[in-house]
Amino acid sequence: MNDKDYDRLLRIKTVGTREWLDQSSHYNRYEATPYSALDELFCDYVLERTDGIVDFGCGKGRLAFYLHNRFEVSVIGIEMSAQLYQEALENLASYRQKAKRVGGSIRFECCLAEDYVVESEDNRFYFFNPFSIQIFGRVVDNILCSVEQQKRAVDIILYYPTAEYIDFLEEGTPFELLKEVRVPGLYEQNDNERFLIFRSRSGK
């Protein structure tokens, strides 16, 4: 299935990109992770129903709906753009007409990523280059502070990872590389087309 077909299956609209001409250089444009890449990742990296996923820079919510539909997990989408947040809520209303699953929940919050208060149930954090390394560092600090308060193993999932993100995690945090998942057909053309999963066990 292509992305439009997948959207149609989930009864949502997430295709396309969006530039923000008047926003800070710290925040990047909207672009959803391709469904084909998500299929590849989550064939190799399985979630449990007890996992709590946070998608920073969730846009219109594609990841949240995909994961809830596939694993019945709880997902929180964080989005700074009021326009994209509203579109995510519209997608949620449409998705709920189809999804009658008991397990898991989907929630969206309109706020800056660094202002999100990490909850004790949150243990999987997803990033598709949503913002600068300065913002990323502050978000990771918030995650680690939460882990100190509520001991648990946590994962950071990077799609299309930048050298800055990787260096920060490897040199300045207790996170260690757990797994690399390359996207077939795309990685051969661009070696950024991959997922890196980092895990911190320091809090457990």
Image (cartoon, grey):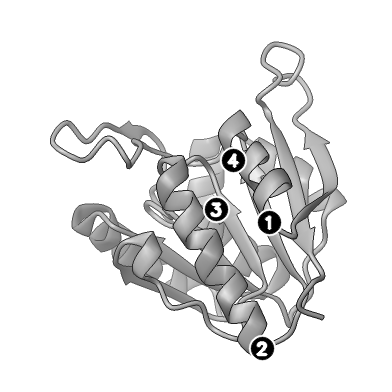
* Circle nearer the viewer, 4 or 3: 4
Residue located at (66% from left, 88% from top): 150
Could you give the CA–CA distance between mark 2 and mark 1, rounded to whole angstroms? 17 Å
Of tags 2 and 1, the one toward the viewer is: 1
Q: Is residue 20 left or right of residue 147?
A: left
Q: Are marks 3 and 1 in contact (CB under 8 Å)?
A: no
Q: What is the spatial separation of the Cα atoms under label 4 and label 2, in whole angstroms?
A: 25 Å
Q: Nearer the viewer, residue 33 or 137?
A: 137
Quarter where residue 164 is shown = top right
Q: Are marks 4 and 2 in contact (CB under 8 Å)?
A: no
Type of amino acid at the residue the image marks with label 4? Tyr
Name the spot of residue 56 as percent of width and height, x first.
47, 57
- Residue identified by numbered label 3: 9
Q: Which residue is identified by label 2?
A: 150
* Residue at the (50%, 53%) spot, across then down: 137
Earlier residue among tags 4 and 2: 2
* Residue density around tag 3, few if under 14, some if 14–19, many if 20 or more, within 10 Å: few
Q: Amino acid at mark 3?
A: Leu
| Residue at image location 24% in from the left, 54% down from the top | 81
Question: Farthest residue toward the top?
Answer: 189
Residue 165: which numbered mark, if any?
Answer: 4
Report x, y in % for residue 200: 77, 64
Which is nearer the eye, 182 or 35?
A: 182
Residue linked to disc 1: 173
Position of residue 67 in the picture relative to residue 86 (left or right): right
